[in-house]
Amino acid sequence: MSDGRTGWLIDGNNVMGSRPDGWWRDRRGAARGLAVQLAEFAAREGVPVTVVFDGSPFEIEVPGEAPLDVAFAARRGRDAADDEIARRVAGAADPVALTVVTSDAELARRVRQHGAEVVPAGRFRSRL
């Protein structure tokens, strides 16, 4: 990436929720579909992407050799994925190199404290 940012952290449920396309009727299918789009994005941009979902873990196959990591929040409950994303940013060797995709104002505030850039979910989704 030309701006020196080298990785993306995606709030998966937030991105899915940015478009009222009925994703909630098949959450697993929507997550799998988003993972395919993110794998294509990661391969095209040549940067690692991590997507974090809320809820119980399930199998999501990552197509091809894309630098995509699919993760699930370590705990259940409100803001679980947000806490996981904030933890990853705080623990990153170079948090300034990260771009977090979310429209959650509180998560955005938390990750900006460490220098991460924030891109709103809807704007990012239009890039996919």
Image (tube, rainbow, N blue to C red):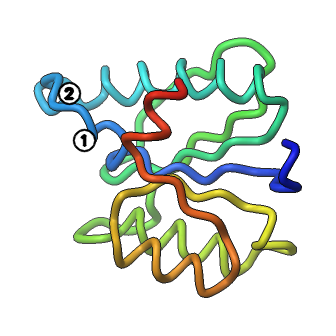
Instruction: Spot the residue most to the top.
Output: 64
Q: In the figure, residue 16 lies in which quadrant?
A: top left
At 42% across and 45% down in the image, what residue appears? 12
Q: Position of residue 61 (x, y in %)?
A: 57, 21
The residue beneath circle 1 is 17
Specify which label sits upstream in the sequence, 1 or 2. Answer: 1
Quadrant of the frame with the N terminus = top right
- In the drawing, what numbered circle is on residue 35? none
At 66% across and 72% down in the image, what residue appears? 89
Mark 2, Cα crowd under 10 Å, few <14 / some 14-19 / many 20+, is some
User: Position of 87 compared to 17: left or right?
Assistant: right
- Amino acid type, label 1: Gly
Instruction: Spot the residue most to the bottom.
Output: 113
Q: Are marks 1 and 2 in contact (CB under 8 Å)?
A: yes
Q: Is residue 19 above or below residue 49?
A: above
User: Position of 7 compared to 37: left or right?
Assistant: right
Front tag of 1 and 2: 1
Mark 1, Cα crowd under 10 Å, few <14 / some 14-19 / many 20+, is some
At 72% across and 61% down in the image, what residue appears? 98
Gap in angstroms between the C-alphas marked 1 and 2: 7 Å
Q: Position of residue 105 (x, y in %)?
A: 34, 72
Relative to the observer, which residue lies in front, 18 or 12? Answer: 18
- Amino acid type, label 2: Trp
For label 1, the SS is loop
The residue beneath circle 2 is 23
Q: Position of residue 60 (x, y in %)?
A: 50, 27
User: Position of 50 compared to 18: left or right?
Assistant: right
